[in-house]
Image (cartoon, rainbow, N blue to C red):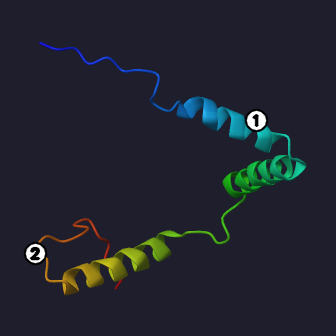
Amino acid sequence: MQTRIFTSSQPDYSSLVKSVARKAWDSPKIKLGLVLWVLGIGFMVFAPAPFKVTPGKINIIIFTVDNKYSSLQFTKPLNPNKIDNG
C-alpha cells in the first residue's frame, strides 16, 4: 500500500487570506464599513416591530396560506388546528 505524501507545493490559502485581511484592516474605509455594519445589525436586532401582530392577523395569514396551499391540490391540510375566521 502506497502512502501519498503531500508536499509544500500546494498553495497555503490561510496565509494569503491573513495577509489580505491585514492589508484591508489598515484602511479606514474598511474599519468604518465594519463599524456601520455592526451598528446596522444592532439596530436590526433590537428595533421594535413596525406593526403589532395580533391573533386576528395571524388567523388571516394562516387562512390565506392555507387557501394557497389547498389550491395546489395537496391532500394534507397545512394547519389542521386553524381557527376559522368566520
Q: Write down the residue under mark 1.
A: 22
Judge whether 51 appears above or below 7 on screen: below
Picture quadrant where residue 23 is located: top right
**Residue 81, labelled with which disc?**
none
Q: Secondary structure at mark 2?
A: loop
Tell me the residue at 25%/79% (across/down).
69
Q: Secondary structure at mark 1?
A: helix
Quadrant that contains the N terminus: top left
Whole-angstrom CA distance, mark 2 to mark 1, is 57 Å
Amino acid on which the number 2 mark rests in the picture = Thr
Amino acid on which the number 1 mark rests in the picture = Arg
Neighbor class of circle 2 (other Cα within 10 Å; few <14, some 14-19, many 20+) is few
In the image, taking residue 86 as reference, residue 25 lies left or right, namely: right
Q: Write down the residue under mark 2.
A: 75
In the image, taking residue 84 as reference, residue 14 lies left or right, namely: right
Judge whether 12 appears above or below 61 on screen: above
Judge whether 55 appears above or below 12 on screen: below
Tell me the residue at 70%/53% (across/down).
41
User: Looking at the image, which is closer to me, 20 or 64?
Assistant: 20
In the image, taking residue 46 as reference, residue 62 lies left or right, namely: left
Judge whether 57 appears above or below 21 on screen: below
In the rendered image, residue 15, in percent from the top left (x then y), is placed at 62, 29
Quadrant that contains the C terminus: bottom left
Neighbor class of circle 1 (other Cα within 10 Å; few <14, some 14-19, many 20+) is few
